[in-house]
Image (spheres, rainbow, N blue to C red):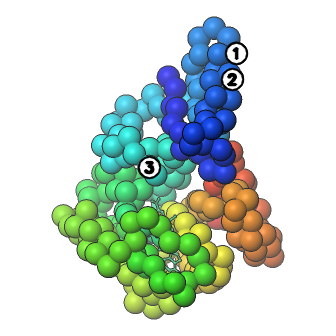
Amino acid sequence: MNHITDQFYGVTKGKEKTFVNGFHQIFHSINNTKKGIYCSDNLLTWGRNLSFMKNERLMKIFNKYSKGQYPLHGILWRMATIVWAAEIGLKLEGDFVECGCYKGTTAKVVHEYLEFSKIKDKRYFLYDLFEHDESFSHHAMPEHSKTLCDEVKDLFKSEKNVVITKGKLPETLSINCPEKISFMHLDLNNVDAEIGTLEILFEKMVPGSIIILDDFGWMYYEQQNISELNWFNKKGYSVLEIPTGQGILIKR
Ligand SMILES: C[S@@+](CC[C@H](N)C(=O)[O-])C[C@H]1O[C@@H](n2cnc3c(N)ncnc32)[C@H](O)[C@@H]1O
């Protein structure tokens, strides 16, 4: 079982194919079975169990929404981490939150995998700007547009327990904000917005709930890493940086 994509950041691609050629050399030097290879999203492993790939239901739902395409296809291991944390949140009191839902596909995989539509006492809060303005300090995403918010609403049109809020965090928390949170995915690529959001939402997270910080381990977002580590350390928490580039923290 392998997961091999060409979704890597900060490498030479294109005509020179330096990175791809290098990978082929590594691949051919892996002995025997050439199994357990995860080559994607700046990760290269071999001889790993990749047990999340044996979860047939998860893989089916993941493939349905990723369609083998950027960006979801390349971040399978990140997705497995998110689903694991969300599944723990299912057993706790409180709602789910994704700050920076973009096209809504990550939340859609979680929602469908956990059969969230059958859960009566939880809501899934999704926040995003959905479009980009030159004045923003963070970078745009390829599919930001004036219609993206409606497209995400359409993706969840039959789900009564999904609350989609368009606008700038943390300000939009004054419009829609959960009382208690049992799982949070923080993915804004934007240090000020993440710290501002944490200031309001972290205290709402119930004991045992998990927060996944998507950008925490990525050097491109080093300022988030520094500021958030500092912010959490002051509260007596530490964050585990994992090889996917995510940070994980369990609320006490
Ligand atoms: C990397 S994308 C999120 C990807 C998404 N979590 C997923 O798994 O597909 C980051 C998103 O954060 C949003 N964002 C950045 N700053 C924001 C802010 N202050 N308020 C709301 N959304 C913001 C951007 O519009 C962008 O869509």
Q: Position of residue 236 (x, y in %)?
A: 79, 70
Quarter placement of the C terminus: bottom right
Q: Which of the labelled discs sits on residue 29, or is there none?
A: 1
60 left or right of 188 in image: left
Identified at 63% across, 38% down, the residue is: 16
Which structural element holds mark 3? loop
Report the Cα–Cα distance between label 2 and label 3. Answer: 24 Å
Residue located beneath label 2 in the image: 26
**In the rendered view, would you say 243 is above or below 192?**
above
**In the rendered view, would you say 150 is above or below 168?**
above
The tag earlier along the polypeptide, 1 or 3, is: 1
**In the rendered view, would you say 23 is above or below 215?**
above
User: In the image, what residue type sits under mark 1?
Assistant: Ser
Q: Quadrant of residue 147?
A: bottom left
Q: Nearer the viewer, residue 228 or 150?
A: 150
Confirm or deny contact between disc 1 and disc 3 (CB under 8 A): no
Residue located beneath label 3 in the image: 70
Q: Nearer the viewer, residue 12 or 104?
A: 12
Q: Which of the labelled discs sits on residue 128, or is there none?
A: none
Confirm or deny contact between disc 2 and disc 1 (CB under 8 A): yes
User: In the image, what residue type sits under mark 3?
Assistant: Tyr
> In this view of the protein, can residue 81 be seen by the observer?
no
Which structural element holds mark 1? helix
